[in-house]
Image: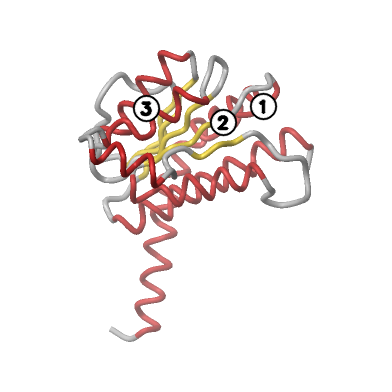
């Protein structure tokens, strides 16, 4: 297969995965955007966490809310959890890696916040633990997860399913979800 054919195939696969995931779930994306907008209107925060392979997606999504996506605007209160390497090492040393997101969530989360998690192709005990803590704190919950993966624990308030089993496509679709969410929230809050 030539390079040009590989590029064309990748574009087709990417487009098909986007179409399959997002066209069937526009209501879920809209509901999530409405919830995040309401959280910001209420003076609360968007807290993000992810399985290790999607941590950069959560981090970038938080940065888009903090800085900007399409235009200059005030920062929106979004915090990415799980990026503390020292805490991660200390918890791993003690056999408590699954508490990384939960510990940070307990420290900075509260009633009225929304916890948005990004899950990859394997069940993640740290993500499940974080959702349990979020519920205990009175946070709303939302999850972006591949369709073929079952979530362990009580289901989040909102779930968006990624229609792919390819690790690279999961990351692409999760990032697109973050971009689209920020775009919809910006439009609602700032009328652009």
Distance, label 3 to label 2, CA atoms, is: 14 Å
Q: Give the left or right position of residue 82, taking residue 93 as reference.
A: right
Q: Would you place residue 33 above or below residue 6 in this image? A: above
From the image, tell me which residue sits under label 3: 130
The answer to which of 183 and 132 lies nearer the viewer is: 132
Q: Residue at x 43, y 43 (%)?
A: 84
- Mark 3, Cα crowd under 10 Å, few <14 / some 14-19 / many 20+, is many
Quarter of the image holding residue 16? Answer: bottom left
142 above or below 190? above
Q: On screen, 81 above or below 68?
A: above
Q: Residue at x 26, y 51 (%)?
A: 165
SS for callout 2: strand
Do callouts 1 and 3 mark residues in contact (Cβ within 8 Å)?
no
Q: Secondary structure at mark 1?
A: helix
Work out which quarter of the rendered image holds the C terminus and state it.
top right
In the rendered image, residue 83, in percent from the top left (x then y), is placed at 44, 45
* Helix, strand or loop status at disc 3: helix
Location of residue 170 in the rendering, given as x and y in whole percent from the top left corner: 36, 51
In this orientation, which residue lies closer to the viewer: 88 or 44? 88
Q: How is the structure coloured here? A: secondary structure
Q: Which residue is mark 2?
A: 46
Q: Residue at x 51, y 40 (%)?
A: 80
Left or right: 127 as drawn, with respect to 190? left
| Dot in front, 1 or 3 | 3
| Closest to the observer, 41 or 12 | 41
In x, y percent, where is residue 22?
A: 46, 44
Residue identifier under label 1: 40
The residue furthest left is 95
Query: Extreme bottom residue here?
Result: 2
Q: Judge left or right: residue 120 versus residue 45.
A: left
Q: Are marks 1 and 2 in contact (CB under 8 Å)?
A: yes
């Amino acid at each position: 297969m030539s390079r040009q054919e590989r590029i064309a195939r990748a574009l087709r696969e990417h487009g098909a995965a986007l179409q399959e995931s997002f066209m069937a779930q526009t209501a879920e994306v809209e509901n999530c955007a409405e919830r995040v907008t309401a959280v910001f209107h209420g003076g609360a925060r968007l807290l993000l966490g992810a399985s290790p392979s999607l941590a950069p997606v959560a981090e970038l999504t938080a940065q888009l809310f903090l800085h900007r996506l399409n235009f200059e605007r005030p920062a929106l209160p979004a915090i990415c959890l799980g990026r503390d390497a020292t805490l991660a090492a200390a918890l791993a040393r003690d056999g408590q890696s699954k508490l990384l997101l939960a510990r940070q969530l307990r420290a900075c989360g509260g009633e009225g916040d929304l916890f948005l998690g990004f899950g990859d192709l394997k069940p993640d005990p740290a993500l499940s633990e974080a959702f349990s803590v979020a519920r205990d704190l009175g946070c709303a919950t939302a999850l972006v997860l591949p369709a073929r993966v079952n979530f362990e624990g009580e289901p989040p308030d909102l779930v968006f399913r990624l229609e792919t089993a390819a690790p690279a496509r999961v990351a692409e679709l999760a990032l697109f979800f973050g971009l689209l969410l920020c775009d919809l929230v910006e439009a609602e809050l700032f009328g652009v």
